[in-house]
Amino acid sequence: MNNNHDGRMTREGIRIHSDADFEGMRKAGALAATILDEVAEHVFVGQTTEALDDFIRNRVEDAGATSATIGYKGYQHASCISVNHVVCHGIPGDKKLKDGDILNIDVTVIVDGWFGDTSRMYVAGKLSRKAERLIQVTHDALFKGIDAAKPGNTFGDIGHAIQSYVEANRMSVVRDFCGHGLGRVFHAPPNVLHYGRAGTGPRLEEGMFFTIEPMVNLGRPETKVLADDWTAVTRDKSLSAQFEHSIGITADGCEVFTPSPAGRFHPTYDV
Ligand code: MF3
Ligand code: CO
Ligand code: CO
């Protein structure tokens, strides 16, 4: 790759990053993904999500990195942990995980000023057939989006790839939350929608950094935010799942900054 457009912004306010910037994102992404690998063994029936968050906070500190979420808009935790019908932004707490609970753990770290943001699904105890199917479809939907993330395509192509795959499996894509540009900032333009029409939206260019993080529900797509002002749940109480990678557009496709070093990103790794 030979990218000398350092510092350029597109008309839509999307930053075009340099080759050196990719290296920064690789390091930040690797730490976030390593922490998600390591937290897996702490997920079990009877465990609290607070204890999982304690592990994550300590692990970020030990690495000499910074949690992007502690202090973000008043948020107090090093992770979001979203159990069962919680769609996203679940707050770690003292409730114990029960047999068959599924959970998304979402970690964002800052390493040398670069943000690495990734999440994946875990299960406490035995995974039910319907939860397994939801998790599999959500995981594969993220990769449909990643496959569409290449120069010449548009952001609408990514959303369309995800939505059509999810709906072909008779599940629904959450509309109320989206992916985002990132880099030296947590949330930057554009909003990366997980639904939409092919060929619409900004065109993808080498050097763009953003997340893809589809939330998929077994029931209807509508969500509501609880009185704590963070926890988003499905309105119909149906199960919800999410996977998130941070990626950078390359000359001929994209680079995933947050692959699992242990090869544990895929939902069935320990099932
Ligand atoms: N990591 C989340 C994302 O994917 C954002 C969490 S913000 C928090 O964008 F404050 F809720 F932690
Ligand atoms: Co994100
Ligand atoms: Co995230």
Image (cartoon, grey):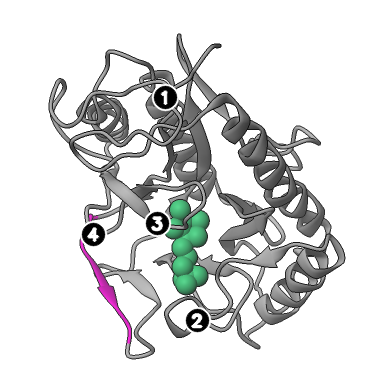
Front: mark 1 or 2? 1
Q: Name the disc covering residue 5, or none.
A: 1
Q: Amino acid at mark 4?
A: Asp
The residue carrying mark 3 is 187
Name the residue: 50% across, 46% down: 183
Which type of secondary structure does the marked residue at label 2 adopt? loop
**Residue 141, above or below 132:** above
Res. 84 visible in picture? no
Name the residue: 23% across, 23% down: 203
Q: CA distance from mark 3 to mark 2?
A: 15 Å
Left or right: 159 as drawn, with respect to 44: left
Front: mark 2 or 4? 2
Q: Earlier in the sequence, mark 2 or mark 4?
A: 2
Front: mark 3 or 4? 3
Residue 89 image offset from top left, x and y in percent:
45, 70
Residue 21 image offset from top left, x and y in percent:
58, 35
Q: Amino acid at mark 2?
A: Tyr
Residue 126 image offset from top left, x and y in percent:
68, 55
Q: Earlier in the sequence, mark 3 or mark 2?
A: 2
Magenta region, residue range: 220-226
Q: Nearer the viewer, residue 199 or 242?
A: 199
Q: Earlier in the sequence, mark 1 or mark 2?
A: 1
Q: Name the disc covering residue 176, or none.
A: 4
Q: CA distance from mark 2 to mark 4?
A: 19 Å
Front: mark 3 or 2? 3
Front: mark 4 or 1? 1
Q: How many marks?
A: 4
Q: CA distance from mark 4 to mark 1?
A: 33 Å
The residue carrying mark 2 is 75
